[in-house]
Image (tube, helix red, strand yellow):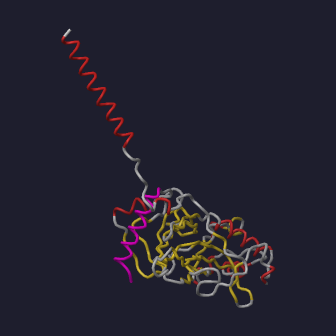
Amino acid sequence: MRLRKTLLALAVIVLAALVAGGAVRLLRPAAVPPAWANDYDVHATAPETIAPGTVVDRSAPAGWSHLVIKSLPRVRPSEVERVPSIPVVGRDLTVRMVAWMFTVFTVDVVHEQQGEHARYRLRAIGLGLGTKVKDRDVVITVDTAGQHGAEMNFIKNDILKTGYRIQKQAVIPVHGPSFALLDTPVISRCGDKHRSIRYRYALLVDTKTGTLDVLLWLLGGEGGECADLTRAVWIEPNCIDEAEMIPDPKEFKGLEPSDLSFAVDKLPPFRVEMAFPPELRELVGKTKFTPDEARALEDGLRKMAARSRP
């Protein structure tokens, strides 16, 4: 009888402890997410399309605060002879058509008043394609080219359609108030082949001044091929990239160029090269982020840039 009473008392004590523990957990306030948790949009979104008719010179065009990169592709002079001579069209026209279209990457940083405080915020990222119209570089689409004075034919239409098809694969995996990533496809010489890989641009806005710093690294192909997650480069402001293209005759299908016929083998002009610290190397290669990871990456990149500022 005494043993039974002892066991019963122990059971009551254990049960009381469990109930009390549960009560403590129920009464404990839920963890409050940090104030910045909703600042980062970590759902993949598409960049804006720069409005047709926008004139792009060597600085930010109308409607945008910053010109990130204007790329002016052309066949590298030493590689012209390797471009196949297409029947009827010939080699010269192919070479001219490579240089017919430019690409442009813009950012809009806006000034906001928040009570007594003012700050700068990264509003939008834009991409576009265009051509020279009466000595001005003008953004066009197939549907609007004629409206803006561009003389078109079936070859130019195909080039523009292909360009926008490839550009539409660009994605923004993270967009915060002062930080964003843009992953954009690029045809690059990788080893002895041309491949479609992704450049990753990190956009860092100074909230006090509106200054924009742009870092770039190689995210690589879908399987990670040709990636370089050990270093980044700091892109020149208002970067004008005289993008020299090299041909691969094997990528001409029936002597017609494919998406992989021409590729770059150099990064855009940059100020300085920086090595990623070990703690950032996993983050810089991610394609999906949590808000915590986005904040950690932004903080890490800002510290790295502060140490390497030109």
Relative height, residue 82 to residue 33 (above, below)? below
Viewer-proximal residue among 19 and 129? 19
| Horizontal side, residue 26 vs residue 45: left or right | left
| Most common SS among magenta residues | helix
Numbered-mark total: 0
Relative height, residue 87 to residue 238 (above, below)? above
Residue 235 x, y percent position in the rendering: 48, 79
- Residue 140 in which image quadrant: bottom right
Query: Farthest residue toward the left?
Result: 2
Q: Quadrant of the N terminus?
A: top left
- Asked whether 104 falls inside the magenta stretch, the response is no
| Horizontal side, residue 187 vs residue 135: left or right | left
- Residue 257 in which image quadrant: bottom right
Residue 103 x, y percent position in the rendering: 63, 77
Query: Farthest residue toward the bottom?
Result: 135
Viewer-proximal residue among 2 and 123? 2
Residue at 39% over, 62% down:
281
Residue 181 x, y percent position in the rendering: 51, 67
Residue at 54% over, 84% down:
238
Residue at 43% over, 63% down:
295
Relative height, residue 142 to residue 286 (above, below)? below
Viewer-proximal residue among 75 and 176? 176
| Horizontal side, residue 29 vs residue 200: left or right | left
- Asked whether 307 falls inside the magenta stretch, the response is yes
| Horizontal side, residue 266 vs residue 134: left or right | left
Q: In which quarter of the image is the C terminus?
A: bottom left
Q: Give the range drawn in magenta.
A: 290-310
Viewer-proximal residue among 176 and 297? 176
Residue 28 x, y percent position in the rendering: 36, 44
